[in-house]
Image: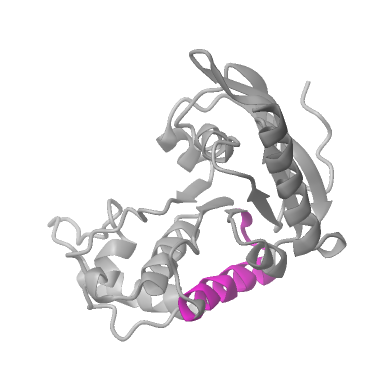
Amino acid sequence: MAPELQDEEVLRAEDIVKRFGALTALAGVTLTLRRGEVLGLIGDNGAGKSTLIKIITGFHRPDEGRLFIEGKQVHLRSVSQARSRGIQTVFQDLALVNELSVFHNMFLNAELVHKPVPFLNNRKMKERTRKYLDDMGVRVSSIDTEVAQLSGGQRQAIAVARSVYSKAKILLLDEPLAAMGAKEGAMILDLVQRLKERREVSIILIAHNYAHVLEVCDRVNLLQHGRVAYDKAADQTSVQELTELVVAEYRKARETA
């Protein structure tokens, strides 16, 4: 029987275990995401963050454990099945086509066509793209511009906007601020903040910069050794506390090496 839906949980990963041969990537992860919440997921490389995300997106299947969406247990067997349930992911590679325009990327693999003659309805796609981006406060010089001509922050924003307007209920952002300067990083943080205020989508944000995490997240989970070792409200912790937890883990690893 599914657990009671507490605080409007939209996602619950319960005792998730994943092994790759002799390697145990996840050793019993329990994680919850509430409606409209932004959850920061942090942890060292190899802690299991990417594996957990790939299980939530249907790319990997867990060896043990259960996954619940809006209180109902699900068995995700593919990425497309996860998307059909409102789970969207923006990975670091963004899955954008650089040679295509902004508006064509917004409707990639979901193009609008005229009927009955199946020609692309560029006018309607442009209209909707302008509305989508304006609604989210995303600024680009022209939606006819090739994505290759945009800044890293603008490309990231386009990828996020596309996911949100694909009727996402749960949005997973994998290192959206990686390799970005301060100005571009601020653009993405502002976008996450606006999404948070709208409470239309629940977000898991993977990031290494603890200051960024605490700026926009409601809650922080720290993954260590394939488990959630720390779960705390963002306003009840600090960059110093999070850093000390990770440093202590490094010291312990060196002592036992």
User: Magenta span has 191?
Assistant: yes
User: Magenta span has 63?
Assistant: no
Most common secondary structure along the magenta stretch: helix
Image quadrant where residue 149 sits: bottom left
Which residue lies at the image location 70% right of the left edge and 58% below the top edge? 36
The residue nearer to you, when weighing 56 against 25, is: 25
Picture mark count:
0
Expressed as whole percent of the image width and height from the top left, the position of residue 174 reads 50, 51
Q: Which region is colored magenta? A: 183-204
Expressed as whole percent of the image width and height from the top left, the position of residue 198 reads 66, 69
Which residue lies at the image location 23% right of the left edge and 59% below the top edge? 97
The residue nearer to you, when weighing 40 against 103, is: 40
* Left or right: 141, with 58 as reference point: left
Examine the rendered structure and indicate whether residue 27 appears above or below residue 147. Answer: above
Examine the rendered structure and indicate whether residue 134 appears above or below residue 44. Answer: below
The residue nearer to you, when weighing 181 against 121, is: 181
The residue lying furthest to the top in this view is 22
The answer to whether residue 11 of the structure is visible from this angle is: no
Image quadrant where residue 197 sits: bottom right
Expressed as whole percent of the image width and height from the top left, the position of residue 212 reads 64, 67
* Left or right: 120, with 111 as reference point: left
Which residue lies at the image location 70% right of the left edge and 27% below the top edge? 256
